[in-house]
Image: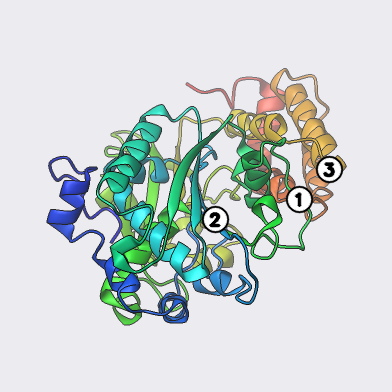
Amino acid sequence: MILQTEGLPDQHSLKTYVEKVNGYTAARKVLGGMSREQVIEEVKQAGLRGRGGAGFLTGLKWSFVPKDITGPKYLICNNDESEPGTFKDRYLCITNPHQVIEGMIIAAYAIGANKGYIYTRWEYQEEIRYLENAIKEAYDAGLLGKNLFGSGFDFDLDHYTGAGAYICGEETGLISSLEGKKGQPKVKPPFPAVSGYLSRPTIVNNTETLANVPWIINNGAKAFRQFGTEKSPGTKLFSISGALNKPGVYEVPLGYPFASLLNIEAGGMQPGRTLKALIPGGASAPVLTPAECEGLTMDFEAMAQRNTMLGSGAVMVIDDRQSMAELLKVTIEFFAHESCGQCTPCREGTGWLNNIMDGIMDRSAKPDNIARLGSVARNMGGKTICALSDACAMPVMSYVQKFSGELQAYLAAGSGGHSK
């Protein structure tokens, strides 16, 4: 569905997208006679859930845009992929950027937006080059701009590069950045669907989410539901990394067994290595032990049952050589660095966690400091404007719960937790 052009010659080009996989036929179909309500209803029936992490229903989100007001509305593609371990959107934009653009045309029509933006962090220069080239190709071919397919619908699309901040992946932080302000999240409500970019109705969708839309329109909601599970339909891109024989990005149906993703798609663990832990959905996801991975399937519900989350689909496989203390240190350090400082529980909490971990790493901490990691984290959750505080607190609590013995050993012995 998503990586249709993968492996084809000039896989990223408009020519390949149009000639090899019938690209832009869905946009032509929508603008050739479907009403906005019909488009939204088709996506609702498909049960497409956001692929950026939250898993919110895409069609339902689109329906929140007021229909009875005049003036500009906006569509934003959240391409600010920043969480450690996540690289599936970068791969998608390099292999099949036109499917993202076509998805944006359809989504923009559905919500009544005539202007769209793709927001990418500036460090990803290769991805930016492919996206901007695809946008130019689309304009040159008359697939963006005025009177698309003779329908009378106009849609202009710009690409915008952020300065590079994790918090700009949060939709209101992204909007603040796009407005030229400091990329800090805003209190909700009002939600962006009512008051977003420049205080106008705005929908922010993840890159992979939008790339699903053309396939749904071409094949129908029922066909989409043939893949995945009842509550998590369709396929999903997983970026899987670690000591594996074939790390990379793989598209599999939601509900796919983790064991198959690991051993078939990713080729299994490297020789001599064993699974020590799994981070199933990016650095913010609570860690799982090997026992918890038994029978695990890759979908929203299965992850929730194990008190973790699918997140953005960044699967990080931790092997037996990795020190969990060192892994926790870099995780906390990342979130402490990326906190925008707006909310006290996040600004102070991430700082305290980082200070405690410094003490554990140089072995100056007291033994009860490990339990204090958990108590500080518990007081950070659900008390801030955005979810960054939770994103730091959740993995910390899981490490303390499941790997407390190793953290204690690292602090006491000084060698038990070192990487080899």
SS category of the residue bearing label 2: loop
Q: Name the residue under label 2.
A: 53
Label annotation for residue 39: none
Q: What residue type is labelled 2?
A: Gly
Residue 229: x percent and y percent?
40, 74
- What's the residue type where badge 3 is placed? Cys
Q: Distance between the residues labelled 1 and 3?
A: 11 Å
Q: Is residue 223 visible?
A: yes
- Density class for disc 3 (Cα within 10 Å; few <14, some 14-19, many ≥20) is some
Question: Dot 3: what SS?
Answer: loop
* 177 sits to left or right of 364: left
Q: Which of marks 3 and 2 is nearer the N terminus?
A: 2
Residue 347 vs 418, above or below: the answer is: below
Image vertical order of residue 87 relative to residue 164, above or below: below
In depth, the one of 180 and 213 nearer the eye is: 180
Residue at left offset 62%, top offset 33%: 165
- Asked whether the beta carbons under mark 3 and mark 2 sit within 8 Å of each other, the answer is no
Image quarter for residue 147?
Answer: bottom left
Figure check: 316 above or below 128? below
Q: Give neighbour class at mark 2: few <14, some 14-19, many 20+ (Cα, 10 Å).
A: some
Q: Residue furthest right?
A: 344
**Residue depth check, mark 2 versus mark 1: number of the one nearer the observer:** 1
For marks 1 and 3 on the same chain, the one whose residue lies earlier in the sequence:
1
Which of pointers 2 and 1 lies earlier in the amino acid sequence? Answer: 2
Label 3, label 2: how far apart the Cα atoms are:
22 Å
- Relative to 262, 62 lies left or right: right
- The circle drawn on residue 186 is 1
Quarter of the image for the N terminus: give it: bottom left
Q: Which residue carries the number 3 mark?
A: 343
Count of numbered tags: 3
